[in-house]
Amino acid sequence: MTKESSNNNQSLPNTFTLNTIGTISSPFKEKFGIPRQPALAKNIISEVIIALPYNRVEAFKELESFSHIWLSFIFHQNTRTEWKPCIRPPRLGGNKKIGVFASRSPFRPNDLGLSAVELINITLTDGEIRIKVRGADLVDGTPIVDIKPYIPYTDSIPDAKAGYANEAPKKPLQVIYSQQSLEQLQSLDSNRYPSLKLIINDMLSADPRPAYKDQAFSKNDDPKIYGIKLYDFDVKWKVTGAFVEVLSVVNL
């Protein structure tokens, strides 16, 4: 990395204002357990609910001709007031520090995020525009500040290098279900909670535990029972060796 001195930034303003154009309605009720990248959330169906005054039909003309879109959003649940130049990414086991700008950590100088998602459809009902998407890795209520079409010939670079994240992460755990959890899932309305079991599989097979857990316990010895809030439920689970067992799916 070379160092260069420049005064070009001295005239730039220190702050900018962003307008929320909509919010995400998603199954995720908290940050814990959300897939760490949108490509790992293929069974997740969410909706972008467009806010006033941006819910004008003409603003979305031709957008539905694209298969995928970019969502620019705010990490609105961040509680840190100061940023740090180095972070410990889960991809590297939480044990190695890298520069924040070499990561996709939500803890950044500005709480801005970007996700590419599949566009399913756009509906207009009683003046409300909703954009249904697949694969959004966003907590329910996340503010959306911009939407752009995904353009393959320019947004996809086949020979790009990705450093420590050059390959998709492996899903290390196999998901199994207790008899109680299976009975609870079978009693649910499949129309109201579509693909719930597949979503649970996606989330838990990727091992959402904090990366440092590998140091606190061995892979075969983690006594803790975890919970993930999904839709209207608290999903309890535990890890034993290479298996994650869903213990129960109960109403919040």
Image: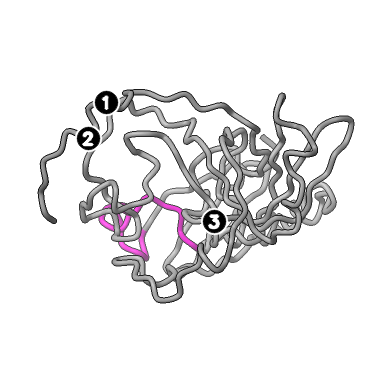
Q: How far apart, in angstroms, are the residues tagged by discs 2 and 3?
A: 36 Å
Of labels 2 and 3, earlier in sequence is 2
For badge 2, the amino acid type reads Asn
Name the residue that disc number 2 marks: 8
Q: In this view, does 77 lie above or below 221?
A: above
Residue in the foreground of this view, choosing between 14 and 252? 14
115 with respect to 190 (left or right): left
Do residues under tags 2 and 3 come within 8 Å of each other at their CB atoms?
no
Residue at 49 percent across and 55 percent down: it is 238
Is most of the magenta stretch helix, strand or loop?
A: loop
- Please tell me whether mark 1 sits on a helix, a strand or a loop: helix
Q: What element carries label 2?
A: helix
Residue under numbered circle 1: 11
Which residue corresponds to mark 3? 38
Q: Tell me if residue 251 is in the magenta stretch.
A: no
What amino acid is at disc 3? Pro
The range drawn in magenta is: 206-221
Q: Where is residue 222 in the image (x, y as percent from the top left)?
A: 38, 56
Instruction: Tell me if residue 214 can be seen.
Output: yes
**Residue 164 spot, x, y in % from top left:** 30, 66
The number of discs equals: 3
Whether pointer 1 and pointer 2 mark residues with C-beta atoms closer than 8 Å, the reply is yes
Residue lying at 51% horizontally and 62% vertically, measured from the top left? 155
The answer to whether residue 179 of the structure is visible from this angle is no
Q: Residues within 10 Å of mark 1 (few under 14, many from 20)?
A: few
Quadrant where the N terminus sits is bottom left
Above/below status of 3 relative to 232: below
The C terminus lies in which quarter of the figure? top right
Q: Gap in Å between the C-alphas at discs 1 and 2? A: 7 Å
- Tell me if label 1 and label 3 are in contact, CB under 8 Å: no
Look at the image and say whether residue 218 sits in the magenta stretch.
Answer: yes
